Structure formats: structure tokens, C-alpha cells
Image: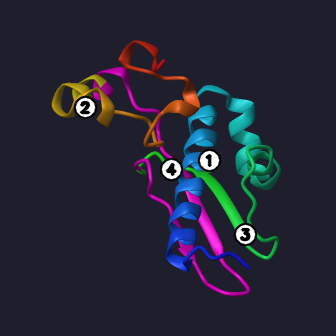
């Protein structure tokens, strides 16, 4: 048993999920075979990144051209849940450049808050 309060654990878990999901979605944008594998059977790819969901949960990745990064949803609780992660279209360089101009370099990223999953350090390295 851990001394860490439940809300701290859940906040850390949400952050872990967001980082790994952001990483696999960013990879799916540049690797079609990875994307198809992610849609077909995401658990092994998530496990390779150190993210595990209980086997009783259903994890779904799917193409959604109308989605935005972070448009994730969960249905159900307890013994059964479905976690749905749409794969939005890859942001365009112009869109990201506009975000940098409006909010500063630290605010622009793909679907990961830090974009470290792609090795991006600034607009010149995003693609």
C-alpha cells in the first residue's frame, strides 16, 4: 500500500496516459503500418511504451478526421470500461506556426503537452 493520496495517484496516471497516447498518435501520423497496428490491436503497442490497462478494459484507437488532440472518452466503470482514442489529422506546419506566434514556443505541440515524444524542440524540428 502506498502513502500517496488517491488523487495524486490518479493525476499521475492521467498524465502517464496522456503522454503515452500522445506519443503513439504522433507516431501513427508518420507511420501508416504502426497506425493500422494501433487501430487493430493497441494493447501490445501501449505495453511497449510501459502503459498497461487492465485486460477487462477495451482500448480503441480509430481514425477521426473531425477529432482534435485530446478528444478522448471513456464509457463504463469498475469491471468494464471502454477507452476511446480518436486519431485526429496530423496538424499542419502552418497551424503549428500560428500557435507559436500566438502563444509562444512552449505552447505548441501535437497531442502531447511536451512534444518530447517526437523529439521536437521547436517549430524547425516538428516535422
Of the 4 image quadrants, the one containing the N terminus is bottom right
Q: Cα distance, mark 3 to mark 4?
A: 18 Å
Is the residue 125 above or below the residue 57 in the image? above
> Where residue 25 sits: x, y (%)?
58, 41
Tag 4: Cα neighbours inside 10 Å, few (<14), some, or many (≥20)?
Answer: few
Mark 2 vs 3: CB contact within 8 A = no
User: Which residue is depicted at the point 43% across and 51% down?
Assistant: 67
> Where residue 115 sits: x, y (%)?
48, 33
User: Which residue is depicted at the point 29% across and 26% down?
Assistant: 105
Residue under label 2: 99
Q: Cα distance, mark 1 to mark 3?
A: 17 Å
Q: Indicate which disc, 3 or 4, sits on the residue closer to the N terminus.
A: 3
Q: Cα distance, mark 4 to mark 2?
A: 22 Å
Residue under label 4: 64
SS assignment at label 4: loop
Q: Which residues are magenta?
A: 68-96
Q: Is residue 14 magenta?
A: no
Q: Is residue 24 left or right of residue 95?
A: right
Query: Which mark is nearer the camera, 3 or 4?
Result: 3
Q: Which mark identifies residue 54? A: none
Residue under label 1: 20
Residue under label 3: 58
List the single residue furthest toward the top.
124
Tag 1: Cα neighbours inside 10 Å, few (<14), some, or many (≥20)?
Answer: some
Mark 4 vs 2: CB contact within 8 A = no
User: Which residue is depicted at the point 53% across and 53% down?
Assistant: 18
Query: Which mark is nearer the camera, 2 or 1?
Result: 1
Q: Indicate which disc, 4 or 1, sits on the residue closer to the N terminus.
A: 1
Query: Which mark is nearer the camera, 4 or 2?
Result: 2
Q: Cα distance, mark 2 to mark 3?
A: 34 Å
Mark 1 vs 3: CB contact within 8 A = no
Amino acid at each position: 500500500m502506498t502513502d500517496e493520496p488517491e488523487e495524486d495517484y490518479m493525476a499521475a496516471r492521467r498524465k502517464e496516459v496522456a503522454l503515452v497516447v500522445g506519443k503513439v498518435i504522433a507516431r501513427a501520423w508518420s507511420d501508416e503500418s504502426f497506425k493500422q497496428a494501433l487501430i487493430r490491436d493497441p494493447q501490445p503497442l501501449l505495453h511497449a511504451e510501459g502503459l498497461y490497462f487492465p485486460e477487462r478494459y477495451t482500448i480503441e484507437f480509430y481514425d477521426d478526421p473531425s477529432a482534435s488532440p485530446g478528444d478522448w472518452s471513456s464509457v463504463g466503470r469498475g469491471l468494464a470500461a471502454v477507452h476511446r482514442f480518436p486519431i485526429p489529422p496530423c496538424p499542419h506546419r502552418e497551424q503549428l506556426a500560428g500557435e507559436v506566434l500566438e502563444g509562444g514556443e512552449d505552447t505548441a505541440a501535437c497531442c502531447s503537452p511536451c512534444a518530447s515524444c517526437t523529439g521536437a524542440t521547436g517549430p524547425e524540428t516538428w516535422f
